[in-house]
Image (cartoon, rainbow, N blue to C red):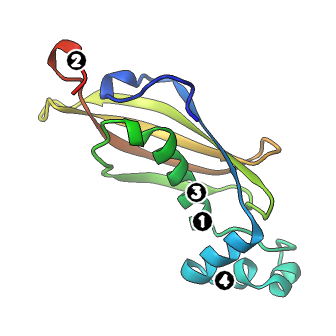
Amino acid sequence: MSDGRTYRYFEDFHVGQEIDLGERSVSEDEIIAFARAFDPQPFHVDRAAAGASIYGGVIASGWHTCSMMMRMVVDGLMCDASSMGSPGLDGVRWLKPLRAGDTLKVRYLTTRVKASASKPDRGVVWSKWVGSNQHGEDVCTIEGMGMFGRRPAGGADA
């Protein structure tokens, strides 16, 4: 899913890089199941109510969209990285509804990197995740930071 490069360590990230994390489609059944469990607003769980809403049909919860994006970031980047977690997010924006049958595509944009001065085993990578639909329209952005381990001394992988 990524661009073929391996992003294991802090040193592998640089400002301006863009990593394609692939795409996945979402079904109405998946949208409704997520919303029933976590965000049961009528336009997420009730076809009739959603049809009569300003959305004209069932839409994914923004939290569902974020969760799908998180999974894609983990599968396409974090699983093979020296991720040490995240101290938090700076912003989430839901720009357009994600609808049943849509295909979500996610890009990871590195916006800032800084090696830790107090903890030399790690650095912080600031990023913006951009989720778009099959029409190229941005549906969600997530901005935040992640901590990554530094490359071991001598450049050898641990």
Vertical side of 31 occupied by 8: above or below = above
Residue shown at 72% from the left, 60% from the top: 26
Other residues around mark 4 within 10 Å, as few (<14) / some (14–19) / many (≥20): some
Mark 3 residue type: Met
Residue at (49, 45) in percent of width and height: 75
Q: Is residue 156 above or below residue 139?
A: above
Between marks 2 and 4 in the image, the one whose residue lies nearer the viewer: 2
Dot 2 alpha-carbon crowd within 10 angstroms: few under 14, some 14 to 19, many 20 or more: few
According to the image, label 3 marks what residue? 68
Quadrant where the N terminus sits is top right
**Cα–Cα gap, marks 1 and 4:** 13 Å
Residue matched to label 1: 64
At a point 40% along the width and 25% down the height, the residue shown is: 13
Q: CA distance from mark 4 to mark 3?
A: 19 Å
Mark 1: secondary structure: helix
Local secondary structure at mark 3:
helix
Q: Which label sits in the foreground, 3 or 2?
A: 2
> Which numbered disc covers residue 156?
2
| Above/below status of 117 relative to 97 | above
Of pointers 3 and 2, the one earlier in the residue sequence: 3
Circle 4 is placed at which residue position?
A: 41
Of tags 1 and 4, the one toward the viewer is: 1
